[in-house]
Image (tube, rainbow, N blue to C red):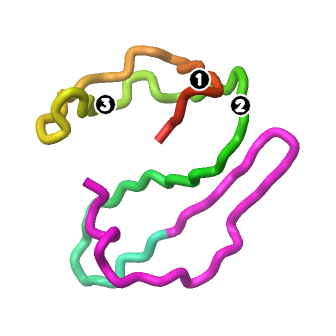
Amino acid sequence: QHGFARNMNWSIVKSESITLDKNSLTTELNVKNTDEKPFSFGTTLHTYFNAFVSGASVRGLKGCKTLNKDPDPKNPVEGKEERSVSIMCNCCTLI
């Protein structure tokens, strides 16, 4: 479920792509394929930052593929995000 990198040997080459300003925290992730064969790659970063958030929003997800793993994680239901903006409160977690 978490991909091949979860149980592979890997290392951080450098750590410097974090930008914090008044209204946002921005991170950048660069991945290098050292194999001769191409592969597709996707990522989700779990920050686990504890923060009180009120009125936060996520934009740009409308039309994206979704996988609903509830109630059966082994048989997710594929769908499409219909909302253009998802509003979250301080009781929600985006992963």
Residue 91 image offset from top left, x and y in percent: 59, 26
Q: Which mark is residue 66?
A: 3
Marks 1/3 in contact by CB < 8 Å: the verdict is no
89 relative to 24, above or below: above
Q: Secondary structure at mark 3?
A: strand
Mark 3 residue crowding within 10 angstroms, few (<14) / some (14–19) / many (20+): some
Q: First in sequence: mark 1 or mark 3?
A: 3
Residue in the picture at 33% in, 68% down: 6
Q: Amino acid at mark 3?
A: Thr
- The x and y percentages for residue 55 are 70, 21
Q: Residue at x 57, y 51 (%)?
A: 48
Q: Taking 83 as reference, is 85 left or right?
A: right
Q: Amino acid at mark 1?
A: Met
Cα gap from disc 1 to disc 3, whole angstroms: 17 Å
**Quadrant, the N terminus:** bottom left
Alpha carbons under labels 2 and 1: distance apart: 8 Å
Query: Marks 2 and 3, how far apart in space?
Result: 24 Å
Residue tagged 1:
88
Residues rendered magenta in the picture? 1-30
Residue at label 2? Answer: 53
**Which of 70 and 16 lies nearest the eye of the viewer?**
70
User: Marks 1 and 2: in contact by CB < 8 Å?
Assistant: yes
Rendered image quadrant of residue 36: bottom left
Q: Relative to 62, is 73 on the left or the right? A: left
Q: Residues within 10 Å of mark 1 (few under 14, many from 20)?
A: some
Query: How far across and how far down the image is residue 84, in percent?
Result: 51, 17
Badge 2 marks a residue whose secondary structure is: loop
- What crowding class fits label 2: few (fewer than 14 Cα within 10 Å), some (14-19), or many (20 or more)? few
Majority secondary structure in the magenta region: loop
Residue sitting at x 62%, y 22%: 89
- Residue 59 shows in this picture: no
94 left or right of 63 in image: right
